[in-house]
Every structure is written in C-alpha cells, then in structure tokens.
Image (cartoon, grey):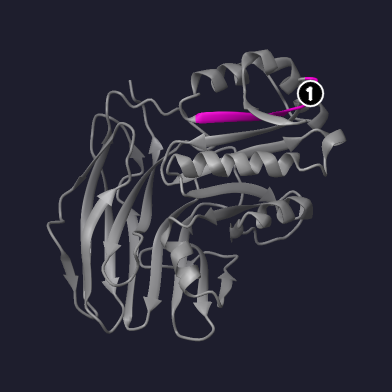
Amino acid sequence: MVRITEFNTIHSDGVAELYRLMGERFSTKLVEYWCKARKYVKVLLAVNDEEEVIGKVTLDLAYKPYAEIVNLMVHPDYRGQGIGSGLVEECIRIAESKGFHIQYLMADVTNLIAHRLYSKYGFIPVILPQKIIQGRNMWLYRFSKETFVKEFLIFKPFSKYYISKKRVWGLWKKAYRVGWADILSQDNLYLYFEGQPGQPIKNGVMPRINGVKISRGNTGLALSVHEINKGINRFNYSKFLIKIVNMGDDTIFIDKINSVALPHIEVKNNSYEGVITLNPGESKTMKFECRLTRDFDIPPLSFNTIVITIKLYVKKLLKHPILVSAGYRREGTS
C-alpha cells in the first residue's frame, strides 16, 4: 500500500537516499528551506508500508493562478506502478483546491515516459527549445476548467493546436506563442509566453502569459503587458502597462478588471474607472503601479521572479476572465 504524505523531517534520511539513487544532490540546507518555506512550498512524498520513501515531488504555490510542479522522482524499483501518477494527481488536486488553476512544469524534450504521464493530465508544450535533443528542456502547461483557455477549448472542441519554436511578435515585443484555431470557423485563441525553454542558472524568468489574442464570431481582442521597470522592491513603485485592442467587428465591453489575490504586494490601477468600451479598431492602454509591502515573505522559488496577474472580464466573449501577467526581478527588501 502506497500513501502520499507531506514531507516531515523524519523522512529526511529516506529522501536523501532517493536523491542518491536518482543521482541528485541533497543537503540539510534543502530540508531547512522546505521547512522555512512551507507556506508556499509543499513537498509531497510517496511512502510504502515499510515507510520507505519511494517518490517525491515539490509543488510551489505562490503567485496565483500559477502553480509549478518541480522535480518529480520515483524510486527505480517502483517505476511503472503509478507512483508518479499519484504524485502528479495530488499536486493538481492541491493546486486546484487553493485556486491555482494553471499548473506548469519542465520536462526533457526526449523523455517520452514523462511526456505520456503529463499528457494524460492535459499538460501541453508552450515553450520549446529550437533543437529537440537530449538534455534540452521544454515548459508544459495545464489549464483547468476554471480558466478562459479551457472554456474556449470546450466551446470549440475541434480546434487545432499550434506552437512556435521561436519568439514571434505580439503587441509590444517578441514572445513564445501557442494557439488553437477552430477548423469549422474562424474562431481562434493565441497565448504569448515570456520565458525561455529551460531553467538557466542565471537570469532566468518564470514562464508566464504576457499576451492574449482571441476571436469568437465578430468579437475579437488582443491584449499584452509591458513592464516599464525590471525590478520590484518595497520602497518604490514599479510600473507596467496593459494594452487592449479591439480586433473584431463588434464593440467590446470590459466591465471588471482586477488583480489576482496577491500576498503582500500592493497593486494600483491609475487608468481604469467603470466599464471600458472599445469600438472596432480602438485601443486603450492602462497603467498599473506595484510594490512589495513590509510583510512580503515569499521566498525565491524555481525562479527569482515576482509575478502580478491582471484579470479582465469581457462581456459576451467568455465567462472566465482573460489574464496577462507582469513579472519582476526581486530587489533588496531590507
């Protein structure tokens, strides 16, 4: 019988042995970090009847709606027995229950076993390396039923999926693009991602949605985020812009704009009051300001990126809000 439990220091020796078998580095500093960051980092273990640690995964829960699944590993003697599936399922369950409706992870482009596992749960590639060779990594995303992406795909089940290996132009800058086009109509949805194919040791940024283009019937819009500043701290406001363009034939009404609930990050919108009306061809640029509060306590996770997500509710287009995310480098907070 295998059970999944959250890491406790009594499991340290078992986790250390699993890391050794997997050829991964393990240290007491890692245990200290897991304990200190427990509010935002969940380490899940698969344990057998003998209390042997036979699987492990980390789930980062900090910047809604994104949850990252990190470093999934299964004991070599227990592979093919559903251990990895159980850990991924528990990650998704926990993330969804806490409002993290977009899950993402990194995988080697040549690891077909991992591809089959993740695709079973709806993960798709969104950022690919240009060369598909062993050792190169890609980012996979999963969108739950509580997202505008899944809503579009449910409404348009015969949509064909597209992905660009290179950055392409959005509204403001180049980004990685994925999209779906309905083979029975002109309806389509494109997402633009900031990020890089893998996780560089230095200067890497968390992969996130920074632009959206969508068309349904006569209604269509594009939006994109642009960070004016590169870093964020608690002393000065950092600024970012969101540009919205009506690309359809019908007038667009945006009746609500808000930020995702953020722990100890102050966000101000200086250019939005009431319903936004955009006639065909019109555009609007909104200005936001943000800074960390004195109580900000999110530790560096896989990336040192602080993410702020803005949701826009568009009447007659989708029930769920469309979202884009700004990202900043963490600066000194003391």
Examine the residues drawn in magenta and state their main secondary structure.
strand
For residue 273, side relative to residue 84 (left or right): left
Which residue matches tag 1?
Answer: 49
| Residue at left offset 67%, top offset 57% | 119
Q: Can residue 174 be seen in this view?
A: no
Of the pair 265 and 230, the residue shown nearer to us: 265
| Residue at left offset 58%, top offset 68% | 163
For residue 96, side relative to residue 219 (left or right): right
Magenta-colored span: 41-50
Quadrant of residue 266 within the rendered picture: top left
| Residue at left offset 67%, top offset 13% | 10
Whether 100 is among the magenta residues is no
User: Which structural element holds mark 1?
Assistant: loop
Of the pair 233 and 269, the residue shown nearer to us: 269
Quadrant of residue 174 within the rendered picture: bottom left
Residue 66 location (% of width, % of height): 46, 46
Please state which amino acid type lies under the numbered disc 1.
Answer: Asp
Quadrant of residue 279 within the rendered picture: bottom left
Residue 214 location (% of width, % of height): 39, 72
| Vertical order, 24 against 104 (above or below) | above
Residue closest to the far left: 273
Check disc 1: other Cα within 10 Å, few if <14, some if 14-19, many if 20+: few
Quarter of the picture holding the C terminus:
top left
| Residue at left offset 31%, top offset 52% | 310
Quarter of the picture holding the N terminus:
top right
Residue 47 location (% of width, % of height): 73, 26
Residue closest to the far right: 77
Q: Can residue 49 be seen in this view?
A: yes
Number of callouts: 1
